[in-house]
Image (spheres, rainbow, N blue to C red):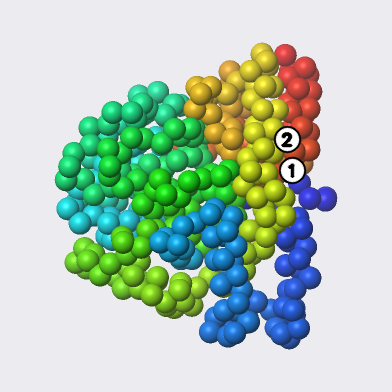
Amino acid sequence: MGRVYNFSAGPAVLPVEVLQEAADEMLDYRGSGQSVMEMSHRSKVYDNIIKEAEADLRKLLAVPDNYKILFLQGGASQQFAAIPMNLMKNRKAGYVLTGQWAKKAFSEAKIYGEAVELASSADKTFSYIPDCSDLPITDDMDYVYICENNTIYGTKYWQLPDTKGKLLVADQSSCFLSEPVDVLKYGLIMAGVQKNVGPAGVVIVIVREDLITDDVLPGTPTMLKYKTQADNDSLYNTPPCYGIYICGKVFKWIMKNGGLEGMQKINQEKAAILYDFLDSSKMFHGTVVKEDRSLMNVPFVTDSEELNAKFIAEATAAGFVNLKGHRSVGGMRASIYNAMPIEGVKKLVEFMDKFEKENS
């Protein structure tokens, strides 16, 4: 079987070009006589790889000079703890609950201080983004936390919350680098890379320099202090070297393909193809209110569990893999990140149309 169309929510599809390039360099990275997998992170060769990756990401996102970029381990889930440890000076922060990951971050924050639920869309199975124009934010809150794109439920903030002057902290794991972003609107952005950027094992944190201090919660592990990582250029200990190397290649691939504006354009096109089909189909329908739909993760269902299961089985056999929805919600979900080619979405829609005709 050749390459499948992989609609996995993460670890997710990577650009073929990047995989090919990594394959060509697997045994001998640019005449060094060794693989990046076996190279010392303290070597000059590797230092160039991580520095170049950081410089390219800074360029791509137009990251201002007063923000640090950190390549860390432990995924977004570890950042659920690191964020309050580093930023919760008053031991109080506000959280907007729009799905599983925001809920997990919220319960983690409760370990370290008072986490306040500012708004939630749990009443309708997280199928919309709550109104965040006038949240009950108090003066003593250190930050306001959001999960900007909800991988499981397929919702996206198309307008950021009014944080009333408080820091905005965002988990952008599943929309990172899918569109232009104004970094200045955030105090901190973090993203697990295994959706849009690279293999699992790296989390990127972009954090404003004035937030990187020694004034952290007592008991914060040395490794989880942003200052430790920033002072050592993400090389305090052995970083996830190979993962960062692949991320660097993906940054170059994005630049070559029109940067974040280019990504946004193609992502809008891909999503439109799928949503237009869902809106006109009698069998399949999307689960998210139109104005809050994600361009990255598209959940959909039929009216019966049996039909859902039959569709997933037949789609898998036809080379459209990982379309099963998250175990907590069921149904189907197509994740159509940057590296999913437009033809993959077109072919999926053709397959859905054929399935509908055969099963109605």
Q: Is residue 198 left or right of residue 27?
A: left
Mark 2 sits on what residue? 345
Q: Is residue 154 left or right of residue 213?
A: right
- Is 88 placed above or below 348 here? below
The mark found on residue 17 in the picture is none
The residue tagged with tag 2: helix, strand or loop? helix
Residue at 74% over, 28% down? 349
The kind of residue tagged 2 is Val
| Quadrant that contains the C terminus | top right
Question: Looking at the image, which residue is at 67% across and 22% down?
Answer: 276
Q: Nearer the viewer, residue 21 or 335?
A: 21
Residue 246 drawn above or below residue 159: below
Q: Are marks 1 and 2 in contact (CB under 8 Å)?
A: yes
Gap between marks 1 and 2 measured at Cα? 7 Å
Q: Quadrant of residue 299?
A: top right
* Residue, disc 1: 341
Q: Residue 40, how many percent across, how many down?
A: 57, 84
The location of residue 122, given as percent across then percent down, is 36, 29
Q: Looking at the image, which is closer to me, 191 or 51? A: 51
Question: In this rendering, does residue 153 appear at all?
Answer: no
> The disc labelled 1 sits on which kind of residue?
Pro
Quarter location, residue 237: bottom left
